[in-house]
Image (cartoon, rainbow, N blue to C red):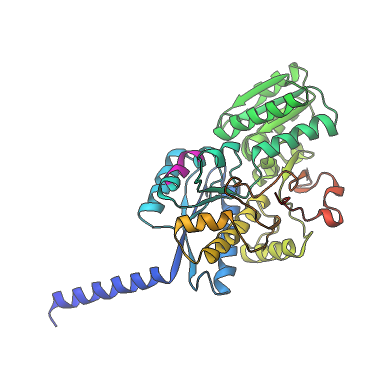
Amino acid sequence: MKLNSIVLAIMASTALAGSAWADDTIKVGLSGPFTGGSAAMGVSMRDGVKLAAEEINKAGGVLGKKIELVERNDEAKNEVGVQVAQELINKEGVIATLGYINTGVALASQRFYEEAEIPVINNVATGTAVTAQFKEPNYVFRNAAADAIQSRMIADEAINRQGFKKPAILADSTNYGQLGQADLTKALDKLGVKPVATEKFNVGDTDMTAQVLRAKEAGADVILTYAIGPELAQIANAMAKLGWKVPMIGSWTLSMASFIDTAGANGDGAIMPQTFIQLPTTPKRKAFIEAYQKKYNVDRIASPVSAAQGYDSVYLLAAAINQAGSTDGRKIREALENLNAKIDGVVTTYDHPFSATDHEAISGNIPVMGLVKGGRVVPAHAEDLDGDKALRVKPKS
């Protein structure tokens, strides 16, 4: 056989093998920040997704095919997220994407999925606008607690439950921080309270002394936050530096390892909404925690909420694909909006979690308040997880 013929034969064989491999798998995008300040959330989410995908594949996959995860690091940057979305859609041919940690990245990127009629399940990004960006048919879903829910919980905890009267809001300058700050201001307003100070800072800032000092001088009796772990730690450390200790109550990101470890003892007592606290309060949670710890050789999950929601998002997508009997984006969207299977998740039991007009799987009754204590997040109010309160489910409409 001539050399050219041999080369052509090898190329044809390789192409056929690639085609067979593609036919045997279902490509699903996995997008998040796996480096940088948001990495605790991104890596935990990714590892939760991978754990669920492996379980599903071992059980026979979806429609007789294995889930093939196509990972991309969006670096928590809007412009990178846009590039990743286009690559996953146009080059990799994913049938859906899981992820998005950062609200800004989600809002910048998911429009490409909407245009391509490919579903996205936001499993961490919480900006209220994320699922409201598009009208029906809407290809954007979420199984995280939206900021509209969290801001009400934060305001209720600070004003009604603990009796503070002079909150100060400290939020970062990202879409996440500023949209969350707006939601929080609205929630306080409904309780007849106005913040005595509203301070802003940038991601990467390492000294919050000026912002904290202005909140102190304004007479704040509690600090309410919307930011991520590294900068939140600088707020706690700045208060300690000034010898001023008032409670910190903020969004779910106060549970990040990058806050807890960097703030140390200064972070103890911080309170935040949580869809999942790393405790074996249900059989599913116990199995998940043990499997995650064994696979990744860790004791404490860096971002338990991100890991649990990432894990659950795979089962939601797999159920929709099975029900659709297809990997067509329109059919998957319709299946998600009308899921028949009841899914035993880590965060909750998903029973018709979505509809055509409601793409939020998490309702306001599901999250509880967590508390940083000795390097861990524990329930802020133990009674919230007592008995039948351990598993909270979305009310049926």
Q: Which of 170 and 381 is in front in this view?
A: 381
Q: Where is residue 314 in the image (x, y as percent from the top left)?
A: 57, 60
Q: Position of residue 111 (x, y in %)?
A: 45, 42
Q: Which of 315 and 69 is in front in this view?
A: 315
Q: Extreme left residue here? A: 2
Q: Can residue 247 be seen in this view?
A: no
Q: How many marks?
A: 0
Q: Determine the main secondary structure of the stretch shown in magenta.
A: helix
* Placement of 8 over or under 226, stated as above or below: below
Image quarter where the N terminus lies is bottom left
Q: Where is residue 184 in the image (x, y as percent from the top left)?
A: 68, 30
Apparent side of residue 87 relative to residue 33 in the rendered image (left or right): left
Start and end of the magenta stretch?
Answer: 107-112
Instruction: Determine the residue positioned at 87% across, 48% down.
Output: 383
* Placement of 22 over or under 135, stated as above or below: below
Q: Which of 48 and 160 is in front in this view?
A: 160
Asked if residue 77 lies in the magenta stretch, the reply is no
Instruction: Determine the residue positioned at 14% across, 74% down.
Output: 4
Q: Extreme bottom residue here? A: 1
Instruction: Determine the residue positioned at 55% across, 33% down.
Output: 175
Asked if residue 111 lies in the magenta stretch, the reply is yes
* Placement of 121 over or under 248, stated as above or below: below
Instruction: Determine the residue positioned at 72% across, 64% down.
Output: 284
Q: Position of residue 257 (x, y in %)?
A: 67, 46
Q: Can residue 252 be seen in this view?
A: yes
Apparent side of residue 70 relative to residue 148 in the rendered image (left or right): left
